[in-house]
Every structure is written in C-alpha cells, then in structure tokens.
Amino acid sequence: MKMSKLFVQTLREFPSDAEVISHKMLVRAGFIRKLTSGVYNYLPLMWRVLKKIENIVREEMDFAGAQELLMPFVQPKELWEESGRWGAYGGELMRLKDRHGREMCLGPTHEEIITAIARDGLKSYKQLPVNLYQIQSKFRDERRPRFGLLRGREFIMKDAYSFDTTQEGLEKEYQNMWKAYSKIFKRCGLDTKAVQSDSGAIGGSVSHEFMVITETDAGENDVFYCDCDYAANSNHAVSKLPEAKIIGDYTKAEIVDTPSTHSIEELCEFLNIPSTLIVKTLVYIVDKKPVLALIRGDKQIEETKLLNAVGGVDIRIAVAGEIEELLNVEKGFIGPKEGLTIVADETVKDMKNFVIGINQIDKHGVGYNWGAEVQLPEIVTDIRLVEAGELCTQCGKPLKVTRGIEVGNIFQLGTKYSKPMNAVYLDQNGKAQPYVMGCYGIGISRTAAAAVEAHYDEKGIKWPLSIAPYHAIVIPVSTKDEQQMKVAEDIYKTLIKHGVEAVIDDRDERPGVKFKDADLIGFPYRITVGKSISEGLVEFKVRETDEMSAIKPEDAAEIVITAVNNLK
C-alpha cells in the first residue's frame, strides 16, 4: 500500500470530546470517526485491526471445537418475552416497531435467539454437547456513552453459547473456553487477569471477566486481587474486615439531639464516637421504587450487589427531594422505615449499642440494638464495597486494587434460558430435559481499544505486531532522490513478496511529517532510507521500544519477515 493512496487523515490535536487515551489516539491517528453518540465509523486502518482480532478469535474458537454461525441483528419481542427479559432488561434495550407494528429490538446479546435455534435443532442427547458462536455488531442504548470504543452503543462482539446435558459438562466447557480466551488475548498482545464478576443482565450462577489491567483512566472497574491468585471485580469482591469497635458505650437506648450533623464525620465529632458505631442508612431508587440500604458507618455500598439483593435492573442514589418526599426528613437523619424495602449489609448484624437515624431532623437514636429498639431487616447480605488493604478471604493477606478494562466474559447460565423457553432434549430414557447452557463473550472492538490503552506513548500507538493494521512502513526521506526511492521500493517489494503487510510512504512531505505519522499510527517496524544509504545502511526502528539502529537494507527486511513468520 502506498501512503499517498491510504485512506487516512491524521489530526494535529486530540479530539475535544475524548476522555481516555484510546479514544484520543484512535481518532487522531485516523482509525475511527464519530457518527453519533456512542456510534463510530471504523475507517480502513481500524477495520484491518478488527479483522485481525476476529481471525485470532476464529482460529482459537474453532480449535476449541466451537462452530461459527450468524444470527439476525434485529430480534422479535416474542422470544424475549419467553425468557422474561423483555420487561426486565432495562433502558439499554433498543426497542422498535416494523411497518406492521410488530415489536422488535436491536440485539444487545443473543441468548434468546440461540436458545430458539437449539430448541429447533438439538433434539437428542446424542447431539450434545455443542458450542455455537458468532461475530457480529451489537447495540446497547447506553445512558451515558463514553470512552470511545470502550463504552459505546454499537460495538462488535464475539458471543458463544454452549449446550450440555449436565453441570459437569458445562464446567468442562467453561474451562475449555477459559483456556481459549487466555490464548486469544495473549496472541493479541494483552496481559489479562480472569476475575470473579457479577453476571448482570446475562444471568447465571458463576461468571468471570477477563480484564486488561491498566493504570489509565479507561479502567472501568476496580479489580481487587491478592498474591494467592484471588481476583474479583469490585461488584463481586469480598474480604475479611479488620477488627473495629462495633459495641458502643451508650448502654441506655435514648433519642438525643444531634443538631446540624448531616454527615457521618459531623455525627462522629458531635458524639465523640468512631464511625464503626453508626448504622448508616442510604436511600436508593431501584426500578423506580425506593430501597433503604443499611451499612456500618465507615463502609460504602456497592450498588451492583444491592441491585442483585433485591432482584432489580436499574439503580441510582435518591436525590434530596426524593428523600424528603419519602421520609419527610433531611439527608443525615435517615433511618429504617416500615413499608419500604430494606437491605442490611452483613457489617451491621453484630453491632450493639449503636447509633442510628430515626427519621427526625436533628435527632438520632443512641444505644440501640437489633430486636429491641429497631428490627434487623429480613434481607441481610453482602452489599459492601471492598477497600484496598482489607484482608483476602482465602489467605488473609491485604488485598490490592488496580483498574481493569473488561475485554471478555464467561458465564455458567445453567437452565436460566432453557427452562422458561422450554428448550429441551430427550435423554437416554426418552425424558425431556432442559439444556445446561454457558455463554462466552469477547468484545472485538473493546479489545482493539484496550490494546491501545496498554501500548502507547506520547507520540502515538504501539500496536502489537499480531493486530497492527500493517506490519511495517518504509520511508524514503526524499522522494526526489533516485537512489533512496529505488532502495525503498526494493525493500517494500521484498516485504510484500514474503507476506509482510507493508506501506511505503511515497508522499512528497517533510521527513518530520512522515515520522510523526508513522509513530502516531503505530507501525511496529519503520525502515527509513536516507542519506546513509550511500554507505549501504538504513535506519531501522522498533516502535514498541523506540530502539533505532543503522543496518543493511536486506537485514532490516529479514528482521521484519522473520517476526511476521513467527506469528503464523
């Protein structure tokens, strides 16, 4: 490919609406362009990257025994009603009607469709197990699209679904996919960590996310981990709490005046107590209904855990006006109230002689106890956000925390979809049994963005060789110098002949412009033919390390050819 013919427009500045490095770099380097909120055009350079990631995924999925198919992007309401998700999925489901008034949705995922396919085609235990996958565009109507390709509305995804006769068979396939995913991300140049996670809208009893660990702002979730190999997303992480004072010195239950104590800190200072003696009450709106969450005063709520505790879909913290309308009290004095759904975190159940809001302005209850002045809610479970330094439940060492970008996930669905959709096979005894299912996703476009987050510097992208749009660029410093052009073209032709995807920068531009574009786009190898060719040497640069050396043209070509051949 000649650079003069390559459809790419690099920008001098980062886009003003980009927050994270992958979004900034991919727009500035001419890989993507925004069409509308959360929706992007994949330009030729980006499409080459995506196709390479897809091919790696296909090779490993096929090797693992999965079979590829393609399902429709538009899905009928009826199948989603069978699974019970039409009304439960939430606002992210993009609903529409066709010209006949039939209700449809744009597929954010394909559990219903694949289950219907299996229901029609897998009638006997002799046909199982089976793993079917596709690579396709998806659409989720994100409330707040951000981070470019990392949290868009339209995205490319590989989703696979396994069908087994037993839980043991599902667990075997789960491990098979785990191994395949490890290979896929390694081949894409990404160091991933498999972490325990929440199953979310997909459902199922067991799930893991494959996270690219990053120190950038693009990390969507905190990942808590330990040297003993424990790792979990913040929405699933658990820990042992350090010892703290949970039995208060107020031995007589009474209501005391606590004027202007709207925060835990102000209440602690006023009563001269540690926050571990306070039962904190927060108000959330879950699926448009109020939920009270109780937790020890020094800890925070993890919203996904709370959402799961009440079986909800959508959650947000209540605003001041809603609190006053529901409880007739200001923030800071909230307490449990009959008639509302109440969830207590496990941190409060052993507390005694504690302090708690009683829904009266400028007043709190002190010396309160469960079963006496206040009743412990029926729902007591883990809704706490783990903090770094708390102790690992497996080995007792302090947990560490980092940021992670999710690029893949695997779920043990069990019979979540097969039972309600009556998707069954006949077992050895001729009895109908529901399939035991698994689900396995990889974000193709997210993987590309995560690769940028993991491989870049201030000059631009450093694509891993396996997914780079082109392997190498050959730059003649002066297109008017006949010797430079001849050597550059000879190197270019040699690379092409041996299967290297190469670009020759034949533009009549200043050398600095060519070098900046090469670094910004992220060609893994750069071969520059300049004045030193009179001495039989070219400049060879490795983008990942920025290491440069003066070597013979044939040696530069051989290094690139060998590296590319080693990918195969």
Image: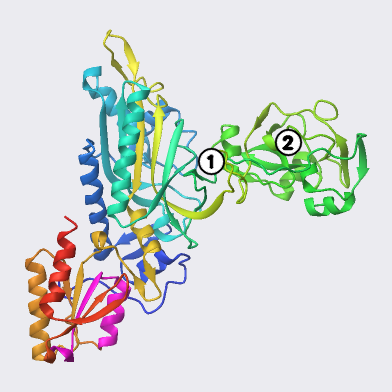
Categorize mark 2 by other alpha carbons within 10 Å: few (<14), some (14-19), many (20+). Answer: many
Alpha carbon distance from label 1 to label 2: 19 Å
Label placed on residue 236? 1
Apparent side of residue 354 relative to residue 243 in the rendered image (left or right): right
Instruction: Look at 25% across and 89% down and name the residue there.
Output: 510
Membership of 514 in magenta stretch: yes
The foreground one among 376 and 69 is 376
Instruction: Kindly check if marks 1 and 2 are in contact, taking CB atoms under 8 A apart as contact.
Output: no
Q: Is residue 447 above or below residue 364?
A: below
* Three-letter code, disc 2: Val
Instruction: Look at 48% across and 61% down and name the residue there.
Output: 215
Instruction: Look at 11% across and 85% down and name the residue there.
Output: 485
Secondary structure at badge 2 equals helix
Label placed on residue 348? 2
Membership of 313 in magenta stretch: no
Residue farthest toward the top in the current orientation of the protein: 429
Residue range (magenta) = 511-533
